[in-house]
Image (tube, grey):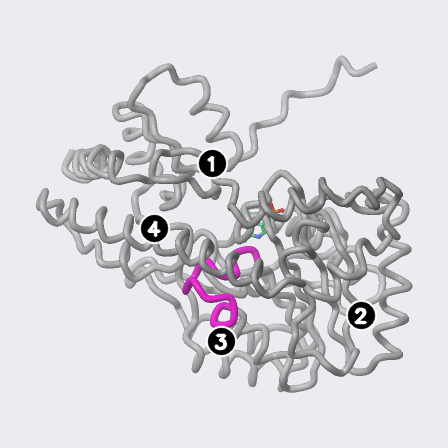
Amino acid sequence: VFGNVVQAPEDPILGVTVAYNKDPSPVKVNLGVGAYRTEEGKPLVLNVVRRAEQLLVNDLSRVKEYLPITGLAEFNKLSANPAIQENRVATVQCLSGTGSLRVGAEFLAKHYHERTIYIPLPTWGNHPKVFTLAGLSVKTYRYYDPTTRGLNFQGLLEDLNASPTGAIVLLHACAHNPTGVDPTVEQWEQIRQLMRSKELLPFFDSAYQGFASGNLDADAQSVRLFVADGGELLAAQSYAKNMGLYGERVGALSIVCRAADVAGRVESQLKLVIRPMYSNPPIHGASIVATILRDRELYNEWTVELKAMADRIISMRHLLYDALRSRGTPGDWSHIIKQIGMFTFTGLNTEQVAFMTREYHIYMTSDGRISMAGLSSRTVPHLADAIHAAVTR
Ligand code: PMP
């Protein structure tokens, strides 16, 4: 009965790792997936996470019962923006950032009057699929300007201004993926004013809090501007990158409402979205996060380790920039040090990317995005050689 099922293509991002794993070359480098690596090229489990896990293991009162549909209550409370004292937020633990986006989108498709969501062009490749499958209709707004390799702020304002009243707008809270280009605080304020005046509904995707500046509060500024004006918003948070909890699938969806009674009703409907989908979320990752967030000493240790990850990424930006300069590689590469977060949007085209993979065993997404977190001082010269060869060919 399944004989007619056609072979599906690999995921454009995760497929890069599949190809990388098949390559026997000893010099191969994987810059495809957005996961942090140490200077030795190894995955990193934060020391603070190990400590939290130790505490959990030693606590024999802990059992493996089901969590409620909404997840671990303490995790939800600690994840919700501390600026929200007014009790007007419904927060549910979800399966990392992706699951939070999906649950939020399913809720909107069912309970919100406007089904169109505007996403930046370009954006993370999974966004259109998540929102379309949830029943929303996806449109784009201009975001990136390839000529300046910066923000197309004018285009962004024009497109949001031309969108229908009430439309949903997906915003990357910080460290925009794939471009590494973020609005300034002043620009965020202009975006906020325009969106509030047109009653556009912000849906923040916060997958990299702490990775842009190395500071959790600074990276939350965009979201907090929109919380401070008392209006509504959604926020999907992921602890995959900033706590290195990728495979634990721990995240939170917060729906900020105008009043506490509304938030209560919203939460009751979120439960109806979650229960038939996966019933309730897993307990381990959320327990790690709650253990760290509730304890001042562990929290401080986390911020130090997070800053160290962000700093290593920034130092890779400088190394790569200097390496291209010293090779005299044609072009202006200053965007490598200007862009923010885990990725550099190099400006290399599909053909150049294919050349670098073929000749240099360097793996990255075909849009020319490279994960700076996958680089080390050992691999930067090899990458610089490859880029130089690709652009001077
Ligand atoms: N949003 C963006 C912009 C991302 O880059 C990612 C991860 N690549 C996610 C959401 C979701 O990640 P996860 O589900 O692993 O938390």
How would you rate the neighbour count of disc 1 (Cα within 10 Å): few for under 14, some for 14-19, many for 20 or more?
A: few
Vertical placement of 298 versus 56: above or below? below
**x and y percentages locating residue 134 in the rendered image:** 75, 51
Quadrant housing residue 282: top right
Residue under circle 1?
43
Vertical placement of 197 versus 251: above or below? below
Magenta span: helix, strand or loop, mainly? loop
User: Element at badge 3?
Assistant: helix
Vertical placement of 233 versus 214: above or below? below
Mark 4 or mark 1: which comes first in sequence? 1
How would you rate the neighbour count of disc 4 (Cα within 10 Å): few for under 14, some for 14-19, many for 20 or more?
A: some
199 displayed left or right of 345: right
Residue under circle 4?
312
The residue at the point 51 percent across, 66 percent down is: 216
Q: Is residue 218 magenta?
A: yes
Residue under circle 3?
158
160 displayed left or right of 389: right
Residue under circle 2?
113
What is the three-letter code of the residue carrying label 4? Arg
**Residue bounds of the magenta highlight:** 207-219
Mark 1 or mark 2: which comes first in sequence? 1
**x and y percentages locating residue 48 in the rendered image:** 55, 50
What is the three-letter code of the residue carrying label 3? Glu
For the residues labelled 2 and 4, the Cα–Cα distance comes to: 44 Å
Between circles 2 and 4, the one closer to the viewer is 4
For the residues labelled 3 and 1, the Cα–Cα distance comes to: 42 Å
Mark 2 or mark 4: which comes first in sequence? 2
Vertical placement of 242 versus 184: above or below? above
Between circles 1 and 2, the one closer to the viewer is 1
